Image: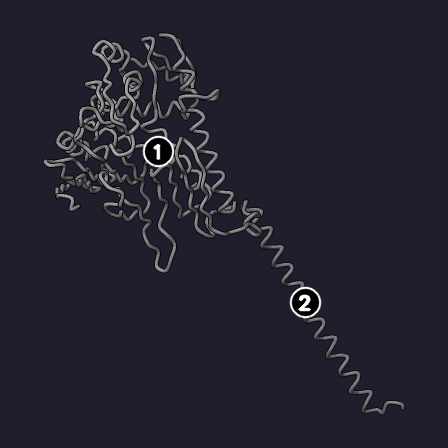
Amino acid sequence: MPKTKVDLVYTMEEGNNNSQSQRRRNGAGRTLILAFLAMVVGYYLAGNINRIWRDTSGVKHDFEVMRTYARITIPEGEGFDLSPAELAREAEKAVRRVNDLMSPRGEASDIARLNSLAANEWREVDPLTWTVVMEALRWNRLTDGAFDPTIGPVKRLFRFDREETEKWPGEGELRQAKSRVGADKILFNREGMRLAFSQSGMTLDLGAIAKCFAVDQAAEVLIAHGVKNAVVDIGGELRVIGQKPGNPPAPWRTGIRNPRGDEPLEELPLADAAVATSGDYENYFIYKGKRYEHIIDPRTGLPLAEGTASVTVVHPASCLAADALATSLCVLGPKAGGEFIRAQALGLFSSGLRVIMLTVGEGGKLIRTEYVVDKAGGVSENVSEVTP
């Protein structure tokens, strides 16, 4: 049947409305496309193009290095240009770089090559190795020799395998080994980053601070990629960035181990800080009923006997500094260690510091001594007995 005039008018109006709706939809689609393209161009110009498609899932990245475990924890959404998983792998590369350079063995190791040199034979080292050696020498000077990276010849005379032993090096062996110890026997040329020993038979051992330097290197990689919150943990030595995300955010937490038990002694809340612990509970031996730990007193050439069970240092910026101080305080002991902290409060520790020392008192009781250095250089001290 032919359409009436009314039918034709309705059909034409309906068609016009459909055309207008279609044009509006097309216009909106073009606007969205243009907005998306503008965003892509903006991200490209800002160097953040990968953020559009990257996986933002959080990650706990575990691996083994330096004869211990390691974990890099990065929450969801962290970083500018890489996913948390990719960031963790980049941080691991930084750790392995330090290990390769400063391990006592390996073809890529500066330390292995240095330790094979004759007296007065020079070797150029990597800038990272140079940095750690210079820090070791600085701590040696600050502590009047309580920290010494050349203690290897003496350390090799003892076995720290948690066993009881009847063996003790003879006086001649100790005397000969001690003659090859001394940070003042390290020669260095700043211009060429070259190192040498003034005496044959010397060795350089950066084990006391290389691990924490690797922690710092990994943390700096994450920070450079825009990470605001994360944790780098290598064998219990930590660097925390920011806080643990949440509503509201909360501090990251770690535990101080009871050196005479298995349970944590206390928890430490942490934000933007580094933590290192030295103690006598992992590497030690028993001789004539007395525990000797793996830390050697460079001044005597002997392992530390029961006295300072552990030292935990919380430093606001450097895991390396925390580790060097923890080792030094084990050697210095509570009295001289407290004097050292007070003497350095206005200079070395003026950015803030927390130290928890656990010493063995009468009857084997643990004594807890805590020092807190505020940003003005003030030092508070608190001593208490640890309840079993």
Q: Position of residue 76 (x, y in %)?
A: 46, 52
Relative to 353, 80 lies left or right: right
Amino acid found under the numbered disc labelled 1: Cys
Question: Furthest residue to the right?
Answer: 1
Q: Is residue 81 left or right of residue 319?
A: right
| Residue 283 position in % (x across, y down) | 29, 30
Vertical order, 173 against 99 (above or below): above
Which is more toward the observer, 228 or 234?
234
Residue shown at 27%/15% (left/top)? 181
What secondary structure is marked by label 2? Answer: helix
Q: Judge the density around disc 1: few (<14), some (14-19), many (≥20) Cα neighbours within 10 Å.
A: many
Name the residue that disc number 1 marks.
212
Which element carries disc 1, helix, strand or loop?
Answer: helix
Disc tally is 2
Q: Callout 2: 10 Å neighbours few (<14), some, many (20+)? A: few
First in residue order: circle 1 vs circle 2: 2
Quarter-wise, where is residue 132 in the image? top left
The one nearer the camera, 280 or 21, is 280
Q: Is residue 111 above or below residue 249?
A: above
Name the kind of residue labelled 2 in the image: Gly
| Numbered tag placed on residue 378 in the rendering | none
Locate residue 85 relative to residue 261 in the image: left or right. Answer: right
| Disc 1/disc 2 C-alpha distance (Å) | 58 Å
For mark 2, what is the residue?
Answer: 27
> Picture quarter containing residue 334?
top left
Asked whether the residues under the numbered discs 1 and 2 touch, taking CB atoms below 8 Å apart as contact, a structural biologist would say no
